[in-house]
Amino acid sequence: MKKLIAGIRSGHPGSLLAAFLYFDVSFMVWVLLGALGVLIAEDLRLSPSQKGLMVAIPLLSGAAMRILVGVLTDRFGAKRTGLWSLSVVLIPLGWGWWGAESFPELLGIGFLLGVAGASFAVALPLASRWYPPEHQGLAMGIAGAGNSGTVIAVLAAPRVAQLDGIGWHGVFGLAMLPVLAILIAFSYLAREVPPRLPQRAATVLREAALWWFCGFYAITFGGFVGLASFLGMFFHDQYGVGAVAAGTLTGLCVFAGSLIRPVGGLLADRAGGLRLLAVIYGLIAVLFGLVGLLPSLYPVVGLLFLGMLALGMGNGVIFQLVPQRFADQIGVVTGIVGAAGGVGGFFLPSILGILKDLSGSYGTGFLVFALLALGGLLVITAHQHRWALAWAQQVDQFPEDHPNRVRMEVVFGG
């Protein structure tokens, strides 16, 4: 506990808290369509493919916007960019409150909610830049644990929607209140780090490590947020679970992935990120392969709980690696890697919905996801040694006490 407190105090605790709160409320509204999906789908009579697209559009939009927000964060600072994005999020919430009477309107709201999904490119740089290399995993894990906002959404939204006189439209209006509250808190708690002008985008894009991180994060975070948005409808369609109970089961699984994220970062600080990530991908492949067999409700909840646990830990590991490898370009790189995660989140519910329509079973989609995780494991296993040699050459360019040497050694558990 003393080490934990010392680690938090080694940077700026107020900014770390601001990053967590901002991330938390942003995730809450980002997955709101998924949290209300059972009620919306019944009201508008949506097909499985439409359900998948409805919850996937905010994820794709968030992926695209993270790149822009990452550049804005590097140029204008995380605090100013965060205040702007929280203000913009009020627009789709108001639209959902007063409108949203058709499927095209839902897609428009989902697109604008992508601004909340771009919160990665604000919260993580705000936390990272205040903390030294040896506490990056802790800081990024605590800030990233704000994805627990998905738990709030899936647990609270269906329950509030079924209260007299509220409905799912009213939930969008009520969601504006915590957004306003966090906007005020963020303005007081966050302390701006002097913005850093990023290198030219072409320079960043030429880094092979960036694209590997994108692929890895598309699996772990894409799986986490895609399932957080879709599991409620999966439980309802596959097992006949009611909206509130489906939200509770989804919340249980999502809570596991959110809670474990800081642990993933801490373990990566000590053991080396790539080694740990290989183990995690193996677990993901096995667990979701078993989910694809579609066992009865209680076993599948247990498997999904463990699967989300593994995905959440993988998220923490990857964002322990990113600031070590790209310390001077963290804003734009966070935006690009986060965008890849959002793209993965877009494809997973879309694939689950489409394959359900085509094959009549959700199991096919889960088996495809398990194969993707297995592919991630094979890639790390095949290339880890070569990456270690290449990055070790960069370590040797710095003196023993240089921060960049510390960062590279942490990456490989050196």
Image: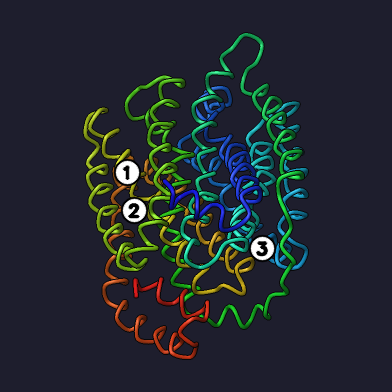
Task: Give the class, few, some or many, for how many residues have Cα within 10 Å of label 1's Cα (few <14, many ≥20).
Answer: few
Quadrant position of residue 44 = top right
Secondary element under disc 1, as helix, strand or loop, is helix
Residue plotted at (52% across, 61% down): 340
- In the picture of the structure, the residue carrying the numbered disc 1 is 359
Residue 409: which disc? none
Q: Comparing marks 1 and 3, which lies closer to the viewer? A: 3
Q: Amino acid at mark 3?
A: Gly
Image x and y of residue 152, in percent: 53, 31
User: Which of the marked residues, 2 or 3, is nearer the chain's N terminus?
Assistant: 3
In the picture shown, does residue 29 fall above or below 157?
Answer: below
Residue 369: which disc? 2
| Distance from Cα at disc 2 to Cα at disc 1 | 16 Å
User: Which of the marked residues, 2 or 1, is nearer the chain's N terminus?
Assistant: 1
326 left or right, relative to 186: left
| Distance from Cα at disc 2 to Cα at disc 3 | 28 Å
Q: Amino acid at mark 2?
A: Phe
Q: Amino acid at mark 1?
A: Ser
Residue 127 visible in this rendered orientation of the protein: yes
Residue at the outermost front position: 2
Secondary element under disc 2, as helix, strand or loop, is helix
Residue 70: which disc? 3
Q: In this rendered view, identify the residue nearer to me: 328 or 212.
A: 328
Image x and y of residue 28, in percent: 58, 37
